[in-house]
């Protein structure tokens, strides 16, 4: 992975029903799985694959990103060797399909891309991918085929629910022959929002896009599909791309399946995040907790089932938490019943309150609300 | 550069009475309360007392300890001038040798202390669980115009003969020292925490080092010598929570105090935090049939069984149909499906097989703590 740089940028835009949770943050820093932010997965995967220089594009709400990443120390990225660069992003608005890979995010960060003249290849990835992934096998496919672009894809199962932002790939043997959006006929291969691209090809495409006024690198690649050598590399194992509330709930639920938990966290590689120095979680004398993910620093005095509880939350006596996602610093009083509820950070629920949502329509309390 | 007070933390002890827990590890680096290590307490106390130069004297099996302390950033002690410095025994032009007693460890590091030109030196040990604002003790030391101040606490009279006790006058000036006296005249036991005026200590250390009969120990040699010279030695009373964790029983009891709601030792007080140095781990996974109550559990644990009134450190796996009660389990331990453990301490990376059955009521002595090696 020498001479490869990583480039993480928001891919699905923020035009999703996750908006209530994105009011104060970008997709990258959406809390997930009891202690993580979404970007932890992509960033850790790049670091674990041996990529030494990574640029992260912040959207226009990037204070949470800077706060989370700091100098990058927690991902073993060092400031002295400029391993991590936080780059400026450009809000892009377009009607119809949302922009997959904003040309402007790349074009205006040309300085980062060209910083080291020895850089040959760029890995472009979305920040919202929940997976433990090694880029090396894909990079090998890219190299052996002398490809210009290698797109990582996933073969979908019949149960796969298509999202409006999905992009599908058609193959002619191993080469990708077409790239199209969901509303046309779809193939069995969905683009996994990760690609490896030759830097010289990328620069060339960016110039073309700039000349023609194209917004989306995917469109530019599509326009040049006959002249570029575009290959696919399969993603096996667990992958979820969080781009809707439904996916967000599904993937939190998936994590309660121990096999998924093991694949993500007990594999060869670790997923890093910002550490907090919390007291161990305190389970009170009369509690019942099962089938749940619990962060550190919590104080639990009630019953929790089938839920994800983030760090530093308090659950009062005789409270019942069922099918919920409770983000950090929640204070939940005594005798509270919460079912199918998502609490953003710093929410307070008074004693005896009852909130019952449904599986399909969870109740969402935005950051800092009290009830 | 001048620093008012330099802390010197004696962390070289083996702690042999902690048996398996210190087989590969210095006592100050033994885990406590799940995620902490014993040394977190004096280091966090220093941070909370605005003491930002701390020399840590290491000797016995220092690898885990050195690695854990790192650059001190976990306790906000990564200062440009000062911070934490690990001070192992070293070689010089005249040769070198191990630290030979508590006073000798400081004597060998006189140069280190002199670099900061302090007025006071605070001597600490890495054996105790307590929260103390040392700046109050230093203020007391100044107000008494003392040469040496010793922190003391009242112990039950019937236990006083197990301690080094001090006899004080009305002004708290120490009149007499008694080391483990059969008939104690006082129940004020020394806590092993000293504030010295540096010039006084430095002179005493140099004199002590020249005495071939000295054991080079603070309690037995240096302090009695200062007392004989009629130096001003005062006792500083401390009455908050303080536990020695030098034996398996006392270590177990102090851990279990954290589960006792009525015990006024709170490690979550935001105004006086106890910090520790943690790696990033996944959150706790509590399985579908797990039963967890009255316990402290750290990140990286996976629990499928019954856990009651226990303390689980990092990265522990508790299998299905297990029964864990009144236990302390250290990092990386694996308790296999079906095991039954009561009143046990499982050492780091210990493995407990499925057919293990340790039931307190079936033991000859039900209060006995079983230690399962890592």
Image (cartoon, helix red, strand yellow):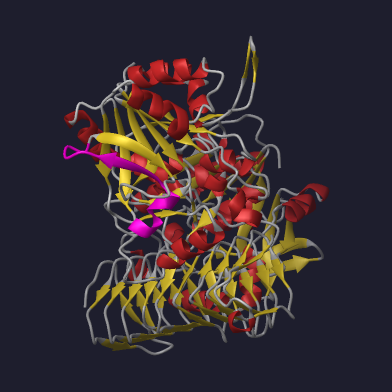
Residue A1 placement: quadrant:
top right
* Total numbered labels placed on residues in the image: 0
Residue beneath the point at 62% across and 81% down? B359
Q: Is residue A140 magenta?
A: no
Is A123 or A298 nearer to us in this picture?
A298
A334 on left or right of A150:
left
Res. B82 in view: no
Residue A54 in the image, given as x and y percentages of width and height: 56, 43
- Relative to B125, residue B324 above or below: below
Residue A60 in the image, given as x and y percentages of width and height: 35, 51
Residue B242 in the image, given as x and y percentages of width and height: 37, 54
A213 on left or right of B324:
left
Q: Please provide the residue range marked out in magenta.
A: B156-172
Extreme residue in the top direction: B93
Is B314 or A321 nearer to us in this picture?
B314
B373 on left or right of A334:
right
Extreme residue in the front direction: B183
Q: Is residue B167 magenta?
A: yes
- Relative to A118, residue A260 above or below: below
Res. A30 in view: yes
- Relative to A154, residue A319 above or below: below
Is B181 or A307 nearer to us in this picture?
B181
Is A318 or A151 nearer to us in this picture?
A318
Residue beneath the point at 29% across and 23% down? B231
Q: Quadrant of the N terminus of chain B?
A: top left
Residue A301 in the image, given as x and y percentages of width and height: 36, 79
Residue A19 placement: quadrant:
bottom left
Residue B120 placement: quadrant:
top left
Q: Quadrant of the C terminus of chain B?
A: bottom right
């Amino acid at each position: 992975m020498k001479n490869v740089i990583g480039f993480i940028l928001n891919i699905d835009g923020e035009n999703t029903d996750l908006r209530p949770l994105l009011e104060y943050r970008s997709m990258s820093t959406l809390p997930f799985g009891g202690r993580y932010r979404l970007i932890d997965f992509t960033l850790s995967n790049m670091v674990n694959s041996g990529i030494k220089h990574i640029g992260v594009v912040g959207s226009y709400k990037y204070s949470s990103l800077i706060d989370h990443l700091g100098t990058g120390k927690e991902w073993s990225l060092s400031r002295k060797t400029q391993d991590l660069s936080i780059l400026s992003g450009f809000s892009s608005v377009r009607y119809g399909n949302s922009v997959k890979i904003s040309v402007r995010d790349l074009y205006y960060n040309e300085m980062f891309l060209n910083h080291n003249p020895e850089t040959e290849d760029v890995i472009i990835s979305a920040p919202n991918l929940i997976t433990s992934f090694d880029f090396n096998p894909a990079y090998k496919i890219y190299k052996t085929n002398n490809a210009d672009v290698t797109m990582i894809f996933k073969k979908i199962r019949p149960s796969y629910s298509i999202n409006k932002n999905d992009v599908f790939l058609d193959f002619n043997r191993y080469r990708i022959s077409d790239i199209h959006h969901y509303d046309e006929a779809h193939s069995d291969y969905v683009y996994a929002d990760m690609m490896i691209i030759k830097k010289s090809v990328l620069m060339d495409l960016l110039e073309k896009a700039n000349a023609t006024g194209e917004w989306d690198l995917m469109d530019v690649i599509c326009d040049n599909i006959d002249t570029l050598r575009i290959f696919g590399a399969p993603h096996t194992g667990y992958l979820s791309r969080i781009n809707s509330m439904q996916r967000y709930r599904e993937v939190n639920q998936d994590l309660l399946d121990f096999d998924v938990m093991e694949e993500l966290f007990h594999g060869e590689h670790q997923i890093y995040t910002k550490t907090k120095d919390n007291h161990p979680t305190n389970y009170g004398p009369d509690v019942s907790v099962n089938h749940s993910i619990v962060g550190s620093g919590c104080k639990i005095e009630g019953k929790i089932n089938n839920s994800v509880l983030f760090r530093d939350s308090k659950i009062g006596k005789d409270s019942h938490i069922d099918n919920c996602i409770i983000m950090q610093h929640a204070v939940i009083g005594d005798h509270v019943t919460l079912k199918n509820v998502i609490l953003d950070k710093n929410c307070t629920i008074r004693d005896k309150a009852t909130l019952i949502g449904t599986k399909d329509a969870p109740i969402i309390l935005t950051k800092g609300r009290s009830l | 550069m001048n620093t008012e007070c330099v802390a010197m933390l004696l962390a070289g002890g083996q702690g042999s009475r902690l048996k398996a827990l210190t087989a590969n590890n210095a006592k100050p680096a033994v885990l406590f309360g799940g995620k902490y290590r014993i040394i977190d307490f004096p280091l966090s106390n220093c941070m909370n007392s605005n003491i930002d130069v701390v020399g840590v004297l290491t000797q016995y099996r220092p690898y885990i300890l050195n690695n854990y302390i790192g650059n001190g950033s976990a306790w906000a002690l990564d200062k440009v001038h000062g911070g934490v410095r690990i001070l192992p025994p070293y070689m010089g032009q005249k040769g070198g040798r191990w630290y030979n007693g508590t006073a000798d460890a400081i004597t060998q590091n006189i140069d280190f202390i002199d670099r900061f030109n302090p007025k006071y030196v605070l001597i600490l040990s890495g054996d105790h669980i307590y929260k103390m604002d040392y700046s109050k003790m230093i203020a007391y030391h100044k107000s008494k115009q003392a040469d040496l101040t010793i922190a003391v606490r009242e112990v039950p009279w019937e236990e006083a003969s197990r301690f080094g006790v001090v006899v004080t006058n009305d002004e708290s000036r120490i009149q007499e020292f008694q080391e483990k006296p059969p008939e104690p005249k006082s129940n004020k036991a020394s806590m092993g925490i000293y504030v010295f005026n540096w010039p006084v200590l430095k002179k005493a250390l140099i004199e002590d080092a020249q005495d071939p009969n000295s054991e080079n120990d603070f309690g037995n040699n240096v302090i009695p010598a200062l007392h004989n010279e009629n130096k001003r030695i005062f006792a500083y009373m401390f009455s908050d929570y303080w536990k020695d964790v030098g034996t398996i029983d006392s270590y177990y009891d102090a851990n279990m105090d954290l589960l006792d709601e009525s015990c006024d030792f709170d490690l979550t007080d935001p105004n006086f935090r106890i910090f520790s140095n943690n790696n990033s781990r996944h959150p706790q996974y509590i399985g579908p049939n797990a039963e967890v109550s009255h316990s402290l559990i750290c990140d990286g644990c996976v629990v499928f069984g019954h856990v009651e009134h226990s303390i689980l450190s990092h990265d522990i796996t508790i299998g299905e149909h297990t029964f864990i009660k009144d236990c302390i389990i250290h990092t990386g331990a694996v308790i296999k499906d079906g095991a039954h453990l009561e009143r046990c301490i499982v050492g780091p990376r210990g493995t407990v097989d499925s057919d293990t059955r340790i039931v307190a009521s079936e033991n000859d002595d039900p209060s006995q703590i079983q230690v399962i090696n890592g």
